[in-house]
Amino acid sequence: MSVRQQVQNLLDFIDASPSPWHVVKTIEAQLATQTPAWERLDETAKWTLQPGGRYYVVRDDSSIVLFVQGQKPLAETGFKIIGAHTDSPGLRIKPNAASSVDGLLRLGVEIYGGPILATFTDRDLSLAGRMSYKNDQGDIASLLVKFDQPLLRLPNLAIHMNRTVNEDGLKLQKQTELPLILSALTEEQLPQAYFSALLQQQTGVAATRILSWDLAVYDTQKGAFWGAENQFYADSQLDNLSSCHAALQALLFDDMQPDTTLVCAFFDHEEIGSQSNKGADGSFLPDVLQRIALSTAEGSEDVARALAKSFMISADMAHAYQPNFPNAYDPDHKVGVNKGPVIKVNANQSYSSESVSAAMFADWCEQAEVPYQTYSHRCDMPCGSTIGPITAAKLGIRSIDVGSPMWAMHSIRESAGVLDHDYLIRVMKRFFAE
């Protein structure tokens, strides 16, 4: 597959995955086309695993762990793990969302994570996520919801009423100025009933059976290449679906029979701290790794030995240098778009990288003939974090934080370099194949 085709495949992956629940569905759909076949495991059932077998586990519809069972005992080889996250910052619809003001129906939203709120204005927005309802048998069931058409909008205030917006920046009052316009209502129409009827029309589930939802706001504009030579691309959710896609391509790239058990772990809730039953700070990955060991008759001491021999790549996007804002960067650690994956370093362990893991990743890059860069945040600015330190601490394994460089992180429309996605896939393949 060419470099451009790899990125087009990524854009298609993102556009099919407007919410964390859709991300997992898209991954499952891709696994269904693979040979040898992938088997979905149930956490409530007993697992029987075979060397070379391909398996995956889903927890609560939006986190997924995939693994290829190694040929050799875990105590001899350990695990090779790539971790990333399925969620992105944005807006989520509140439970009692619909209200009417001066004949306009609006949906109230809650801020999820740390989005750049101003980028949500004047965009063609819609809804996607999960809805729970009572089925014909009286049981609680869930299904995915996705409105394809532009459904919502957050119109900006005209400059005539906000004269200093270009000097002071657009500032939105989080409670009163973020509700999204959905429709015009007549006096007879009730806001919540109207919204429930809309969900019924989209899903086929009677409004009286709808109990709750997890609905994210997403941008309906498709991903695109840009630049005079199409050397860049833009889409929503590059942070961090680009990393999920790269890791998935590395795991699926051939029908290898590895000696080591290979794992991809994609978690929800990273953007809000990872503290949930399906987040990186929960038990999901430790549970799966322990069950892999137990199903292969490894004792508790062998599990500890396996973890001591394991390595994890925590893959999350990195801040590329933007020359319009030079004062936002450490001048000695400027990383460029289309110049290779970035090793992210922080002395206070906001990133899990340290000298040994950084050297190991640099060596894999050199073996894969991939350039690499190193990033350190300005000392006078707070540094973000990733699942890397959380997972490394929970499992006690060596880890590194890396990612492709990108612009406008946490905007509703992010940008990155075409070459970098291929670079990251190549070094991840090298990691899994070593």
Image (cartoon, helix red, strand yellow):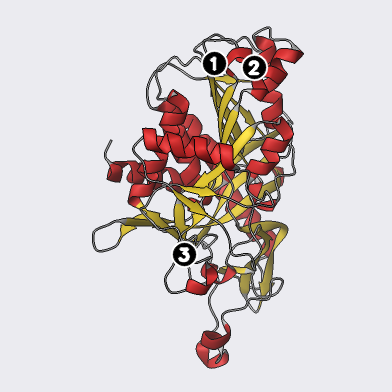
Q: Is residue 131 visible?
A: no
Depth check: 249 or 340 in front?
340
Query: What residue sits right under mark 1 in the picture?
Result: 69
- Density class for disc 2 (Cα within 10 Å; few <14, some 14-19, many ≥20) is many
* Lower sequence index among marks 1 and 3: 1
Seen in the picture, residue 163 relative to 324 is either above or below; the reply is below
Work out which quarter of the rendered image holds the N terminus and state it.
Answer: top left
Give me the residue at 65% from left, 47% from top. Answer: 270
SS at badge 3: loop
* Lower sequence index among marks 3 and 2: 3
Distance Cα–Cα, label 3 vs label 2:
44 Å
Distance Cα–Cα, label 1 vs label 3:
44 Å
Depth check: 54 or 305 in front?
305
Give me the residue at 52% from left, 45% from top. Answer: 402
Amino acid type indicated by mark 3: Asp
Give me the residue at 66% from left, 11% from top. Answer: 295
At which x and y percent is residue 133? 69, 40
Depth check: 9 or 337 in front?
337
- Density class for disc 3 (Cα within 10 Å; few <14, some 14-19, many ≥20) is some
Q: Could you tell whether 406 is left or right of 137 in the image?
A: left
Q: Could you tell whether 426 is left or right of 136 in the image?
A: left
Query: What residue sits right under mark 2 in the picture?
Result: 292
Amino acid type indicated by mark 2: Ile
Distance Cα–Cα, label 1 vs label 2:
8 Å
At which x and y percent is residue 384? 63, 56
The part of the image, by quadrant, that contains residue 235 is: bottom left
Query: What residue sits right under mark 3 in the picture?
Result: 124
At which x and y percent is residue 31? 46, 26
Amino acid type indicated by mark 1: Gln
Whether residues under marks 3 and 2 lie with C-beta atoms below 8 angstroms apart, the answer is: no
